[in-house]
Amino acid sequence: MWEIIEAAGWPIWPLIATSVYGFAIILERAWALRASKIMPGHLIDTVHLMLRQGVIKKENLDELRGSSPFGEIIYTALKNKDASLEVLKDSIEESAGLVAHKLETNINALGTISTVAPLLGLFGTIVGMVELFSSFTSSGHDVAIFARGISVALYNTAGGIVVAVPAMIAFRYYRSKVENYMNEMQLQTIAIVETARGERK
């Protein structure tokens, strides 16, 4: 591995730093976006139990709010369940927007990495080409410098692609995952509100 880094030259270091940052984000989002953390399986049953008991205590709502992102949305919905439909809808949408913003933390950075990495690779390619052409002189050319230039150019081109592709895949995957979570949470919340308002049994 070290031989490859040496062959790629100094332009590979920004790519390595970018890849480490991207990999850290991928791991962090994989941990943060677990279903058990976003939409705990027991949460719906807990809420329905609270509704069947008839009285929803403030401490129950506070506990619900701090339990998970889904709990935050349900908390807002139950807190405003007796308001007009317009106010209720606006409150749920506002809460869902805040939750979505939290869930999308660092995801856009992956999109940036997938765009920037090929450009860093291209920069390394240009550096390699400059080094390659510098091997030609009026008295001939230096084979070692020529080979070094090709090595720098190719490794950095490949490095840019290798960093960009996983970042783009992860970006699209996590964006889709957040959208699916938000759709499911809003549907479940609507069902809970209808139950709380007596519109659904």
Image: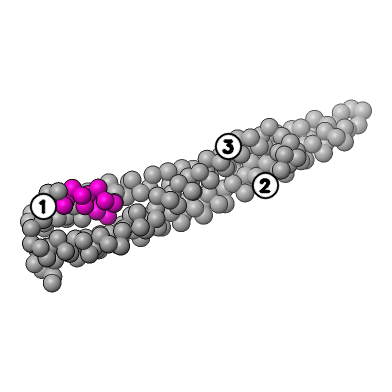
Can residue 80 be seen by looking at this rendering? Answer: no
Instruction: Specify the label residue 17 is tagged with.
Output: 3
| Residue 190 drawn at (x, y percent) | 19, 62
User: For the residues marked 3 and 1, what is the alpha-carbon distance in whole angstroms?
Assistant: 50 Å
The amino acid on which the numbered mark 1 sits, given as a three-letter code, is Lys
The residue singled out by tag 2 in the image is 158
Camera-near label (3 vs 2) is 3
Q: Where in the figure is residue 107, as x and y percent of width and height?
A: 43, 47
Q: Residues within 10 Å of mark 3 (few under 14, many from 20)?
A: few
Q: What secondary structure is the magenta-colored segment mainly?
A: helix
Gap in angstroms between the C-alphas marked 3 and 2: 15 Å
Quarter placement of the C terminus: bottom left
Amino acid type assigned to the residue bearing label 2 in the image: Ala
Q: Residue at the location (39% across, 55% down)?
A: 34
Check whether the beta carbons of the residues at disc 3 and disc 1 lie within 8 A of each other.
no
Residue 18 drawn in magenta: no
